[in-house]
Amino acid sequence: MKRMRTHLPSRKAIAVLTAALLATGMAACGNSDTGDKGDDGKITLGFSQVGAESGWRTANTTSIKEAATGAGIDLKFDDAQQKQENQIKAIRNFIQQKVDVIAFSPVVESGWDTVLKEAKDAKIPVILTDRSVDSADKSLYKTFLGSDFVKEGRLAGEWLVEQKKAAGGPVNIVELQGTTGSAPANDRKKGFAEAIAANPNLKIIASQSGDFTRAGGKQVMEQFLKANPKIDVLFAHNDDMGLGALEAITAAGKVPGKDITIITVDAVKDGMQALADGKFNFIAECSPLLGPQLMDLVKKVHNGEQVPARIETQETTFTQEQAKEALPNRKY
Ligand code: AHR
């Protein structure tokens, strides 16, 4: 009787088949089109930063970079040099590179709908951090992480009202606004104006942008001092502009913190030092240490978890005495 020949695959053929199947499976797992982790297994985050305009921004950038490293997130960082067109370009690049998540701190509030829609169509979740946008369509981003800027302006105004309630005559205030059209400039202005509104003797006699920089603060304060013989109060939307203004005030022969009451926002180390030295009078804090919370959110949105629509940072205020106490432990 003839023996039947069975066509069982050889060991070599089985090995080749198994390797091919494994390779196909792995490629599917690492496919960034599906929003999964990249080849190195890390989540890729594209982050567009406003720029490097202030001490606050430097501390914020450090916080984000350190937190990304700590969380094992692959960070693609872009500095927009305070230009919206650069941020739009960076976001489009991130979309093209198929990053897993995009986060950005919008330089101004308006004009984001088109590029945010492009990210949404590409199925890349977007997180807003530090500054928000005024888009009516809230589905264009997953969440906002940052400060309540209106509250910061209000706290600054309330402190001033309390200090000047005994002042009989007019109190002349000059205001150094942040970058025109930015959320912190719009909101701090609003909060401050609301807080002093019921006190007609507190008058804002001049208000102009110093672009959140020391140079801008100095230059605009020089103009204010030339145009207004009696300035009682300076409200600067951040420490850096206040620090620039100090130079202009001193050069004009006035004593900062005494002849002119100075209120700022941020509480970075240099600002706190000026407050402890009696050159500033009050600071409303704005925390730049957003990195760790941002990385948590990146992981959550990447995993498709629900996150709150808005997450606000816990902040405080500082008088001169409180600044002296806090300075030795200040991290930024
Ligand atoms: O958006 C936060 C603000 O931007 C900070 O108060 C200011 O210092 C920075 O430039």
Image (cartoon, rainbow, N blue to C red):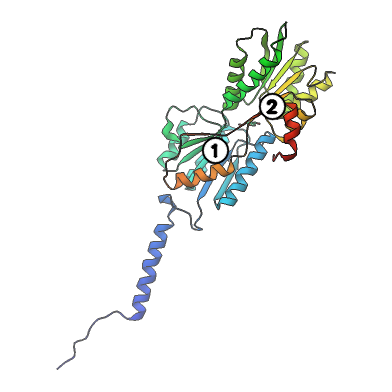
Q: Which residue is rendered at x = 56% and y = 35% of the image?
A: 105
- At mark 1, the secondary structure is strand
- Ligand 1 shows up in the quarter that is top right
Q: Residue at x 54, y 45 (%)?
A: 295
Circle 1 residues within 10 Å: few <14, some 14–19, many ≥20: many
User: In the image, is the residue at mark 1 within 8 Å of ligand 1 by its beta carbon?
Assistant: no
Residue where numbered disc 2 is placed: 283
Percent coordinates x, y for residue 197 in the rendering: 60, 11
Residue 279 screen position, x and y as percent: 78, 25
- Residue farthest bottom in this picture: 1
Q: In this view of the protein, which residue sits in the foreground, 125 or 147?
A: 147
What amino acid does circle 2 point to? Ile
Amino acid beneath label 1: Phe
- Helix, strand, or loop for circle 2? strand
Tell whether label 2 touches label 1 (CB within 8 Å).
no
Residue 232 placed where, x, y %? Answer: 75, 14
Compared across the picture, whether 43 is left or right of 233 comes to left
Local packing at callout 2 (Cα closer than 10 Å; few below 14, some 14-19, many 20+) is: many
Vertical arrangement, residue 69 with respect to residue 215, above or below: below
Task: Name the quarter where the N terminus is drawn.
Answer: bottom left
Q: Residue 242's image quarter?
A: top right
Decide: is 13 above or below 187: below
The x and y percentages for residue 34 are 40, 50
Residue tagged 1:
104
Quarter occupied by residue 258: top right
Q: CA distance from mark 1 to mark 2?
A: 26 Å
